[in-house]
Image (cartoon, rainbow, N blue to C red):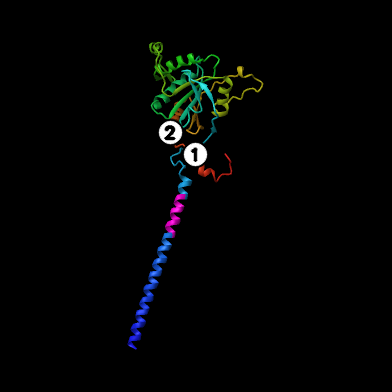
Amino acid sequence: MLQKIKTGSILFRSLQQLNFAKNMVMSRKIWWYVAFFAALLGFFYFLVFRDYDFSKSNLPVINNVQDFAFTDQNGKPVTQHSVEGKVYVAEYFFTTCRSICPKMNANMRRVYDAFKDEPGFMILSHTCMPETDSVPVLKAYEQRMLSGQPYTHADGSYRLTEDTAAIKKGGLNATNWFFVTGNKEPLYKMARQSYMIDNNKPDSTQLIKDQFIHTQFFALVDKERRVRGIYDGLQNEEIEKLKHDIKDLLKEKVTSKHFMNGFSNNPN
């Protein structure tokens, strides 16, 4: 009888050990499946969010900038490829302007001074009078913009000092400030349809040669050629905001979001 009890006890312990071993194997399988699906889920989220820019600015997207082709103060082409992956500010002016342009470009010079050593930044100053603002004229204007120094006028606006000797001497070259000219129609089209900085709707019957843009607004464009802000180029507080927003956009990453586009109904 005692022998039977011992045998039963041994058999019971054996069954317990066998069940324990089975449970261990099952537990390991479960944890393996959990780890596998966790890794799979992690990889999925990596694909989804790898293009997501967590540093992006809160500035809204106002418009997309179309392709363009102009000529700068050095006679070199400036196209959409020139601004690829860069943050830039766009404005319109003309070299003989004696009203708002000197104030605007004194402020633009302040923006230039703040970011002239930043390789990811540019300024595009478009002439609104291409019939008179030729490449040599724009080059001479560049010398005026670079030789002078911004100072505060009695009315609180900024102006540039005029260094006649430096202007005559020449030889100054902007690192990332481009004064561009071209055909009048695409220049005006860019202001109205891309940069959104001309509020005056032209008379549809008016010939392009009779139209004139005279705007004080600057457009801020991000690395993906999207307008992200419009600023009054005559207001100091607006210039300070512009400089702050430029810093934010410079931190943004260029994103393709190819994977995310696969979930979109938009074929583009």
Residue under the image location 66 percent in, 21 percent down: 205
Q: How busy is the neighbourhood of tag 1: few (under 14 within 10 Å), some, or many (20 plus)? A: few
Residue furthest out toward the bottom: 1
Measure how far apart labels 2 and 1 are at the Cα level.
17 Å
Residue with the mark numbered 1: 256
Residue 164 in the image, given as x and y percentages of width and height: 40, 11
Element carrying mark 2: helix
Observer able to see residue 157: no
In this rendering, the count of numbered labels is 2
Magenta stretch: give its range: 33-43
Residue 33 in the image, given as x and y percentages of width and height: 44, 59
Mark found first going from the N terminus, 2 or 1: 2
Instruction: Tell whether 267 sits left or right of 1.
Output: right
Question: Do the residues under discs 2 and 1 have CB atoms within 8 angstroms?
Answer: no
Q: Is residue 156 magenta?
A: no
Residue with the mark numbered 2: 250
Instruction: Tell whether 117 sits left or right of 219.
Output: left
Q: Which of the numbered marks, if any, corresponds to residue 210?
A: none
Residue 11 in the image, given as x and y percentages of width and height: 37, 79
Please tell me which residue lies in front, 67 or 99: 67
Element carrying mark 1: loop
Residue 10 picture quarter: bottom left
The amino acid type of the residue labelled 1 equals Ser
Observer able to see residue 193: yes
Instruction: Tell whether 261 sits left or right of 170.
Output: right
